């Protein structure tokens, strides 16, 4: 069974990155209020969240249940693809 705090952490980091990349959701209002959606900072914010998620995946490898591992892997894969796409202007 996934640990609720772990799921919350992954979802929070992913939501922050997605808000910085322009997704409109509940995290967007908070991110905008904190100045994280300004064009100059948005990509940096998303990259920082991706780095944290990647580090978390590396440090927890072999210690997560299937659901946690899939959640984390999906978040990393999704954000990496979004950043790659944003970086090429697509």
Image: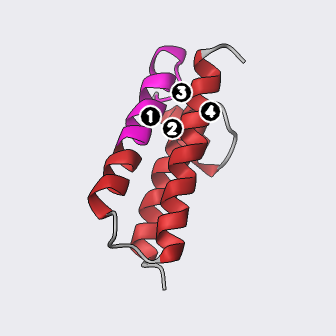
Q: Dot 1, how many residues are within 10 Å of its Cα: few (below 14), some (14-19), or many (20+)?
A: few
The residue that mark 2 highlights is 31
Which of marks 2 and 3 precedes in the sequence? 2
Question: Sequence-wise, which precedes: disc 3 or disc 4?
Answer: 3
- According to the picture, the residue beneath numbered tag 1 turns out to be 34
Q: Which residue is drawn at 54% across and 16% down?
A: 39
Query: Crowding near pointer 4: few (<14 within 10 Å), some, many (20+)?
Result: some
Q: Which residue is drawn at 56% across and 45% down?
A: 77
Q: Label 3: state its secondary structure.
A: loop
Closer to us: 62 or 76? 62
Q: Is the magenta stretch mostly helix, strand or loop?
A: helix
Question: On the image, numbered disc 3 is attached to which residue?
Answer: 37
Reading the chain from its start, which is encountered first: label 2 or label 4? 2
Gap between marks 1 and 2 measured at Cα? 5 Å
Q: In this view, does 49 lie above or below 56?
A: above
At 54% from the left and 63% from the top, the residue drawn is: 71
- Which of disc 4 and disc 1 is earlier in sequence? 1
Q: In this view, does 39 lie above or below 82?
A: above
In space, the residues marked 1 and 3 are separated at their CA atoms by 8 Å
The magenta stretch spans which residues? 36-51
x then y, percent, for residue 36: 47, 29
Judge whether 44 appears above or below 1 on screen. above
- CA separation in Å, label 3 and label 4: 16 Å
Q: Which sits in the foreground, 35 or 80? A: 80
Residue at numbered disc 4? 82
Q: Nearer the viewer, mark 1 or mark 4?
A: 4
Q: Do the residues labelled 3 and 2 touch (CB within 8 Å)?
A: yes
* Residue found at the far front of this picture: 62
> Is the residue under label 2 in contact with that under label 1 (CB below 8 Å)?
yes
């Amino acid at each position: 069974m996934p640990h609720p705090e772990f799921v919350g952490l992954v979802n929070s980091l992913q939501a922050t990155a997605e808000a910085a990349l322009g997704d409109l959701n509940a995290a967007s209002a908070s991110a905008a209020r904190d100045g994280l959606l300004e064009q100059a900072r948005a990509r940096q914010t998303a990259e920082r969240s991706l780095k944290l998620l990647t580090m978390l995946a590396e440090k927890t490898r072999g210690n997560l249940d299937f659901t946690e591992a899939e959640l984390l892997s999906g978040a990393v894969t999704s954000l990496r693809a979004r950043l790659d796409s944003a970086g090429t202007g697509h």
